[in-house]
Image: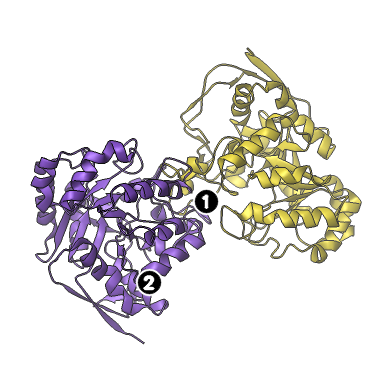
Chain colours: A purple, B yellow
Amino acid sequence: MATSLTLNTPLDMHLHLRDEAMLKLVAPLTAQTFSGALVMPNLVPPVTTFEALKAYEQRILDAASYEDFKPYMTLFFQQYDKAFLEKVKEHIIGIKLYPAGITTNSETGVSSIDSETLRPTLEAMSDLGIPLCVHGETNGFVMDREKEFMPIYESLAQNFPKLKIIMEHITTKDAVELLDKYENLYATITVQHLLITLDDVAGGMLQPHLFCKPIAKRYEDRDALVKVALNAHPKVMFGSDSAPHPKHKKEACGCAAGVFTAPIALQILAGLFETHGKLDNLQAFISDNALNIYGITPPKKEITLVKEPFLVPENYSGEGEMVVPMYAGQTLSWSLA
Amino acid sequence: MATSLTLNTPLDMHLHLRDEAMLKLVAPLTAQTFSGALVMPNLVPPVTTFEALKAYEQRILDAASYEDFKPYMTLFFQQYDKAFLEKVKEHIIGIKLYPAGITTNSETGVSSIDSETLRPTLEAMSDLGIPLCVHGETNGFVMDREKEFMPIYESLAQNFPKLKIIMEHITTKDAVELLDKYENLYATITVQHLLITLDDVAGGMLQPHLFCKPIAKRYEDRDALVKVALNAHPKVMFGSDSAPHPKHKKEACGCAAGVFTAPIALQILAGLFETHGKLDNLQAFISDNALNIYGITPPKKEITLVKEPFLVPENYSGEGEMVVPMYAGQTLSWSLA
């Protein structure tokens, strides 16, 4: 039985760091254990200019306080011309497309995802080798939103066969099935969607700290996600979608969507992979697959986990902000060494 | 266009009044506009003895403060012998069956709903003409719990053909379809399940004040409920399932299930029935059907509603308790005269 585990250059390929005091609180919590993270651009206003991109990158570096951490920056999708994309290419890892209004700070997203309308930008991205990261939900019934988005993924994959398309934070067996159908489709999966279903969110008491978008689905969906993640499917990467919202906003009426997992994701994943007898596959899920898919060379970092109880803090606070992690107050079976 | 509407002897055939300070706060809010209400027995401990039943009835009468209001009392289902049921028969309107642990204060409910196991009690109830009120959910996936319960309703309806069985607070088209299949099946429907779906609870921000059990389902389910309620299906009665939980418990992490609608249900229903051009059918849904199904003669009461804006209070408070109603702070189109 494994009692310790060393992970090389762990990567979080879908992360929300927000800005200002919240950024200062949460950036070190990721930088402590991850070599790099793909940082989402849905600030207010969203990151759409070279200047905003570089300024946000600097604020992240200033906040992170670990030298061996690299933020991989993204732009918020809109129609960009090729000259601009050529200029920013070396400074971004991808461009994130949000359907308008689908989640936190996505109001200025794309109102109609039509391959022809988006062709100039997507062709330029394809030519320049810039990946497209997609929040794949329609505005339909909450349990159907991701499934209904599958034809849009198919259309994008068919129309832009050389464009790398990342289906972000997938939650359904439908998305899993699409992975092997198109060469240019990839996916990130969060830690919570490997563990919970709608039953955990709303089957007993209502649990705002497990409420996120896309919402957790059915058992058969979770099983399909677990299967590809734990078997180290080469097109699947870890992306926490860790989303810090202030405690008072998560526990109020009308709570925002997002689960905060950044400082506990590795510990949870070690336990999950061990339970399934797949501990050897965690390195691929947490790093190797992303290195291959994105062709990046993050700072080297070795993180050792040990099989010792870890009491998840009730909250993380500082700079006037307080966030509650998933499993607050519960004990995990793996700890950071 | 109707500008006023008079309802005779409005009845709420599924109501939670709780006890102590909460009872004192909410009982008058129902008694003000309803002639009678079927009161649920899931106190802690549940109402299972003649003494507890009569004492609770007296506490309700003391709290209600309206002479023209009658609480229709229920017992919490367990195995009862026929002699006991003969003694209490004139003091109850029905017996409420909860699957164990399915909702608030149901821990001592029935762990396995098997017609043979329950036969002695159900046959006695059938012989004595005591209706069986059922919370019809399995402990399966939250969106499937009611649908999965349908075979249990069918088994009960077939095995006890003279027993009146009320499918409480139905939320699915599956339950609606069962209504016409068995002569001895009836149903109550809440106001919220005629209006909301899971999208309203968890499709945007998370809305604890719309979280209840059974949870609101899909659009096609809501449409099926609307169809039978608004067309005055004779086997369908209004039962609010109005469930007061203290504000601080509804807006906290791990919020309890229940929507508080008692003081606003008539106003909402008037607006809904009017919108569908079915205002003439509200009398059947709110009273006449229940009179026929249960064979009761409640105190006479005339309630007049007028088409004037009504600002729903942010909360109702008193006796140290505070509850937040559905649509708090929003304006309805109908008011009490």
How busy is the neighbourhood of tag 2: few (under 14 within 10 Å), some, or many (20 plus)? many
Which residue lies at the image location 82% right of the left edge and 60% below the top edge? Answer: B80
Tell me the chain of label 1.
B
Q: Which mark is residue B256?
A: 1
In the picture shown, does residue A156 fall above or below A69? above
Tell me the chain of label 2.
A
Q: Quadrant of the C terminus of chain A?
A: bottom left
Q: Position of residue A133 (x, y in %)?
A: 27, 51
Q: Position of residue B315 (x, y in %)?
A: 49, 34
Q: Position of residue A298 (x, y in %)?
A: 14, 66
Q: Position of residue A144 (x, y in %)?
A: 48, 47
Please, what is the three-letter code of the amino acid marked with disc 2? Answer: Leu
In the picture shown, does residue B155 fall above or below B264? below
The residue nearer to you, when weighing B70 against A230, is A230
The residue nearer to you, when weighing A15 against A22, is A15
The residue at the far bottom in this view is: A1
Q: Which mark is residue B32?
A: none
- Label 1 residue SS: loop
Q: Which mark is residue A230?
A: 2
Q: Is residue A52 visible?
A: no
Q: Is residue B276 visible?
A: yes
Please, what is the three-letter code of the amino acid marked with disc 1? Answer: Ala
Please tell me whether mark 2 or mark 1 is closer to you in this view: 2
Which residue lies at the image location 84% right of the left edge and 60% below the top edge? Answer: B121
- Please state if A241 lies on the left or on the right of B174 as rendered: left
- Label 2 residue SS: helix
- Please state if A264 lies on the left or on the right of B191 as rendered: left
Quadrant in the rendering for residue A115: top left
The residue nearer to you, when weighing B162 against B217, is B217
Cα distance, mark 2 to mark 1? 35 Å
- Please state if B2 lies on the left or on the right of A17 as rendered: right
Query: Disc 2 vs disc 1: Cβ atoms closer than 8 Å?
Result: no
